[in-house]
Image (cartoon, rainbow, N blue to C red):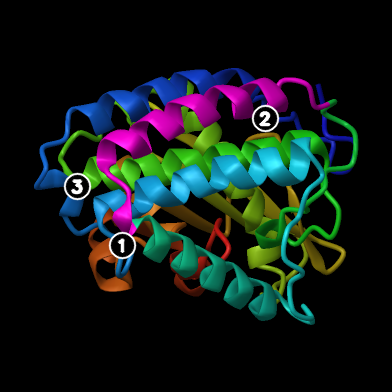
């Protein structure tokens, strides 16, 4: 199936949520009391805070998407940064409230709500308009399939933040789970490069190495960056990223200096180096 906006193959993720949720419960149930309070690559968040954030995502999905209940009215949102500020405030309030909740109760709530979220996502027609657009990809309107894929990347990378803190990252790097995460995140590329003006036909190829990796390309055509599905013979710039580092770049989970040790850029360096600033999260 193809995305009718971009003529690209859509990224199916609905079937992956139960698998990802089972893996989340497995890793959380393996934690010691001390593990729950380990620091993570998410600034100011410990392992428990990220699990709490994942529960918030489940509950908001069920309340807003399934039940059409939005609760409080947000303040005026006039820009992308206004939206990020509002979401950050909601996240902080939720995490503070859940300090009184035990890990056991938290895991039980994640189990219950995870099943319901997976069931709801499975009912969404892929080409109907989503309630929320994928703003980090530059879309004002998105299809359901892209919204669901975005939610998959949220669940994937937050679980991997937990796993990184407790040294259990391997399961999420499988091809079946990591490739959809990367393919969805790469949808940010044309929007991320929108202000980089180069000659017609210049191209950028991004390769993520490892079992779940892949290769993606964009090209300058008619003063905009567009997706290129075919192989690019002589790209203007080529970027190779170690698999274990790619997701951390796209989620602000690694410094630029550290990331540079795991990235190889060939050709036009300035074009390739722009990848260090790309985000596939609301931040």
In the image shown, does 46 or 197 lie closer to the viewer?
46
Q: In the rendered structure, does residue 119 fall within the stretch colored magenta? A: yes
In the image shown, does 245 or 97 lie closer to the viewer?
97
**Mark 2 crowdedness (10 Å alpha carbons): few <14, some 14-19, many ≥20:** some
Q: What residue lies at 57% left-to-right and 59% top-to-bottom?
A: 236
Q: Quadrant of residue 220?
A: bottom right
Whichever of labels 1 and 2 marks the residue nearer the N terminus, that label is 2
In the image shown, does 124 or 10 lie closer to the viewer?
124
Dominant SS in magenta: helix
Q: What residue lies at 38% left-to-right and 55% top-to-bottom?
A: 98
Q: Is residue 232 visible?
A: no
The magenta segment is 99-124
Q: In the rendered structure, does residue 254 fall within the stretch colored magenta? A: no
Mark carried by residue 111: none
**Mark 3 crowdedness (10 Å alpha carbons): few <14, some 14-19, many ≥20:** some
Labels 1 & 3 near each other (Cβ < 8 A): no
State left or right for residue 65 relative to residue 254: right
x, y (%) of residue 56?
A: 52, 49
Q: Which residue is mark 2?
A: 11
Viewport quadrant of the N terminus? top right
Mark carried by residue 45: 1
State left or right for residue 157 relative to residue 66: left
């Amino acid at each position: 199936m193809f995305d009718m906006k971009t003529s690209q193959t859509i990224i199916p993720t609905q079937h992956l949520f139960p698998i990802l949720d089972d893996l989340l419960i497995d890793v959380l149930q393996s934690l010691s009391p001390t593990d729950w309070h380990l620091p993570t690559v998410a600034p100011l968040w410990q392992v428990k805070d990220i699990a709490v954030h994942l529960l918030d995502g489940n509950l908001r999905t069920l309340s807003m998407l399934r039940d059409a209940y939005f609760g409080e009215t947000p303040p005026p949102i006039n820009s992308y940064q206004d939206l990020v500020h509002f979401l950050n405030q909601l996240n902080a309030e939720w995490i503070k409230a859940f300090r009184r909740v035990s890990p056991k109760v938290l895991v039980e709530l994640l189990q219950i709500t995870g099943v319901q979220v997976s069931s709801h996502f499975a009912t969404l027609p892929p080409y109907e308009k989503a309630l929320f657009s994928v703003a980090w990809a530059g879309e004002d309107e998105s299809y359901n399939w892209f919204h669901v894929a975005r939610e998959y990347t949220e669940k994937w990378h937050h679980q991997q933040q937990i796993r990184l803190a407790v040294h259990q990252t391997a399961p999420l790097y499988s091809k079946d789970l990591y490739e959809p995460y990367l393919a969805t995140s790469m949808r940010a590329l044309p929007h991320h490069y929108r202000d980089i003006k180069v000659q017609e036909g210049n191209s950028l190829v991004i390769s993520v190495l490892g079992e779940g990796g892949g290769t993606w390309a964009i090209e300058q055509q008619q003063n905009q960056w567009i997706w290129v599905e075919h192989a690019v013979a002589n790209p203007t710039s080529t970027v190779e990223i170690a698999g274990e580092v790619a997701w951390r770049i796209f989620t602000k989970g690694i410094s630029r200096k550290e990331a540079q040790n795991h990235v190889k850029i060939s050709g036009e360096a300035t074009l390739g180096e722009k990848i260090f600033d790309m985000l596939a999260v609301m931040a």
